[in-house]
Amino acid sequence: MTNFALTVKCPSTRGIVAAIANYLAEHGCNITDSSQFDDTETGNFFMRVSFVSEEDRTLAALEEGFAATAKGLAMDYAFHDEAEKMKVVIMVSRFGHCLNDLLYRWRIGALPIDIVAVISNHMEYQKVVVNHDIPFHHIRVTKENKAQAEAQQMSIIEESGADLVILARYMQVLSDEMCRKMSGRIINIHHSFLPSFKGANPYKQAFERGVKLIGATSHYVTADLDEGPIIEQETVRVTHAQSNNDYVSLGRDVEAQVLARAIHAHIHRRVFINGSKTVVFPASPNSYASERMG
C-alpha cells in the first residue's frame, strides 16, 4: 500500500472534514493520521491527512477526482507521496554546526531529504560536503558582486530542482527579490529567541543583559529581516555563573536542534503559513523513525 498525505487550506465552513473523509473512503483509502485547525480570527481552516490507498489508486487519479469536492469548498489543496524526498539546497558560511548536524541526520535517514547542493561564500566546508558526494559551490559575496552572486545562487537552485533552501547559518542578507521569488521555501535559523536580541552578537547582548534563558528561532525568510513566520523555537536555561562563551556553545546546540525540527515539519508538509504566523501540526506516527536507528 502507498502512503499519501493531503494538505488543505480553505475558508472555514461546515462539512469540510466530512467531505474529505467521505471522498477518501469512497476511493478505497484509509486515514491513518489527521490534524486540523479552525482559525476563528482569520476564518481559515487547515487540515493535514495521512492515508493509505488500499485499492492502489494513483496520486494523479486521487488528485483529479478530488477537484470537484475542492472547488465546492474553495480549497487550496495538494496530494503528496510521503515516500518522495524533497530536494534541498543548503547555504552556509563559516559556522558549521548546523550543516554538520543536518548532514548526520540526512545520512542516517532521520531527515529524509535529497540534498542536491551546498552553497557557501567560504571554503571551510568544501571537503566535508564533497566527502558526502554532494555538489559544493563556492560563491564569494561582496558588496560589489552581491547581485551577480545571488543570480548564481538562484541558477543552482533552479537547475537542481530544489524545493527548499536551508540557511544553515548563512551570514548574508538575501535580496527582497529572492525572498519574494522563494516565498515559503527558504528556512533560516536565527541564533536568538526572537524578537529579543536581533542583529549581530545576540549571545553577547543576552550575556550583558543577564538573561536566564537563551534560545533559537527557525522561520521562513521574508523581505523583513528576521521577521518571517516562525516555525520552531527552543530555549535553554543559563545562570549568572556562565560566560559569554558558554552562551555561544549552548546556543549552537539549540540552533541545530531547532533548525532540524523546523525542516522535519516542512518536509512532511506539517507547516501552513497563516498570514504572519504558521500552523504547525504534530508529527505523524513513525515519521521520526530513521533508516539507521541506534
Image: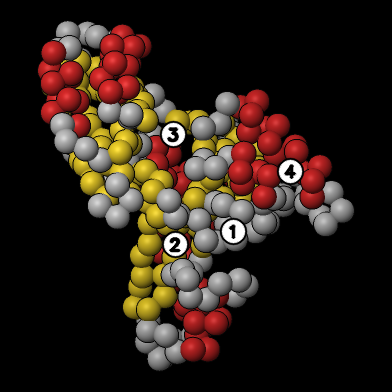
* Image position of 118 (left or right of 285): right
What is the spatial separation of the Cα atoms under label 2 and label 1, in whole angstroms?
A: 15 Å
* Image position of 133 (left or right of 14): right
What is the spatial separation of the Cα atoms under label 2 and label 3, in whole angstroms?
A: 21 Å
Task: Give the percent coordinates (x, y) of residue 245.
Answer: 52, 79
The quadrant the C terminus occupies is top left
What is the spatial separation of the Cα atoms under label 1 and label 4, in whole angstroms?
A: 18 Å
Tag 4 secondary structure: helix
User: Is the residue marked by circle 2 packed among few (<14), some (14-19), or many (20+) residues within 10 Å?
Assistant: many
Task: Give the percent coordinates (x, y) of residue 161.
Answer: 57, 26
18 over 129 or under it: above or below: above
**Labels 1 & 3 near each other (Cβ < 8 A):** no
Q: State the mark number for residue 150.
A: 4
- Disc with the residue nearer the chain's start (2 vs 3): 3
Tag 3 secondary structure: strand
Which residue is depicted at the point 62% across and 72% down?
Answer: 200
**Labels 2 & 1 near each other (Cβ < 8 A):** no
Q: State the mark number for residue 173.
A: none
Tell me which amino acid carries mark 1.
Asp
Residue identified by numbered label 3: 113
Residue identified by numbered label 2: 217
User: Is the residue marked by circle 3 packed among few (<14), some (14-19), or many (20+) residues within 10 Å?
Assistant: many
Residue identified by numbered label 1: 224
Tell me which amino acid carries mark 4.
Glu
Which residue is depicted at the point 51% across and 66% down?
Answer: 191
